[in-house]
Amino acid sequence: MKKKLRSEFNPRQYMLAEDFELYYYSDLHFKSVGRHTHPYTEIYLFIEGNVDMEIEGKRFPLKPGSVLVVHPHTPHRAVIRDDAVPYRRFVFWVSERFLDALRMESEDYLYLPDLAGTKKKYIYPLPPLEFNTLQSKVFSLLETIHTGNFGRETQIGLSVRDLLLALGRMIYRQENPVRKKETVSSYQVITDYIHENLAGDLSLDTLSRELFLSKYYIAHLVQENTGISLHQYITKKRLSACIEAIQSGQGISESSLQLGFANYSGFYRAFMKEYGCPPSVYLEEYLPGNGA
């Protein structure tokens, strides 16, 4: 899985770049770095391993699909419980200078780092769909970093901002769940429910029962706002989520079954109709670097 984008672990705990550094590590028999601090924000996307993170003297077990944020000057270290299990993670270092510059553009980019600094909350488990989305964004950023294509620097800047904003939005929803009594548009309620339940039953009957809205109203709202039918909308969302899951390392068949397609043949037909080619061809031609 994206082996060419992996970095060999280096115990260095200082930045060489001025703005950010991004690494994809996968280690067996990992030798822990001792307790340390650094003057930059550290964000982990934890994929796999039997690991605790010790932060300010307290241990937190890491679960796959978790985001970990360590604020500058916060003592921490990884503690390996079983070094025979691969310790797989993305490590994203962001300098204070760069975050200050982003803050001038929008406070939204810094929601997650600021939250870690003010609330001393460090670990955020994410649903598989959201974590797959993040992995896809990270892999795309890594691929851009490792290429010399036209517009590379501009794309890197956009991708870093997109990643920080996506992280912030996901954690914001966790920290600020929408209450049923709050004023939210019915269309947003419908689309949020679909996004959060792509792997489950999204029949019109189920949506009507769960959202307390009439079937006609649901179908009409989606058609009016998207220009396509509810079924088409759900299929497009599921296909997009499948692509992100595949980019994050899951198999094509496994991803399709996990995201609500009854069988692979149904997924294949939907993919062909949407993209005009088989999944394997699309991944090879339109998502370069997707191979192991």
Image (cartoon, rainbow, N blue to C red):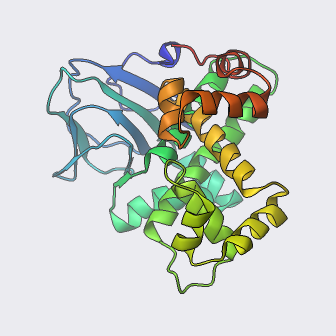
Residue 92 located left or right of residue 160 = left
Quadrant in the rendering for residue 235: top right
Instruction: Report the number of discs.
Output: 0
Rendered residue at 67%/71% (across/down): 215
Q: Is residue 136 above or below residue 76?
A: above
Rendered residue at 62%/33% (across/down): 266
Q: Is residue 107 visible?
A: no
Q: Position of residue 57 (x, y in %)?
A: 16, 52
User: As rendered, which of 126 and 222 lies closer to the eye?
Assistant: 222
Residue 276 located left or right of residue 147 = right
Rendered residue at 42%/51% (across/down): 126
Q: Is residue 18 above or below residue 204?
A: above
User: As rendered, which of 71 and 5 lies closer to the eye?
Assistant: 5
Rendered residue at 66%/69% (across/down): 188
User: As rendered, which of 255 and 44 lies closer to the eye?
Assistant: 255
Q: Position of residue 132 (x, y in %)?
A: 51, 39
Q: Residue furthest bottom?
A: 181
Q: Position of residue 231 (x, y in %)?
A: 70, 52
Q: Is residue 11 visible?
A: yes
User: As rendered, which of 214 and 44 lies closer to the eye?
Assistant: 214
Q: Is residue 65 above or below residue 126?
A: above
Quadrant in the rendering for residue 91: top left
Q: Position of residue 195 (x, y in %)?
A: 58, 55
Quadrant in the rendering for residue 104: bottom right
Q: Is residue 197 above or below residue 172?
A: above
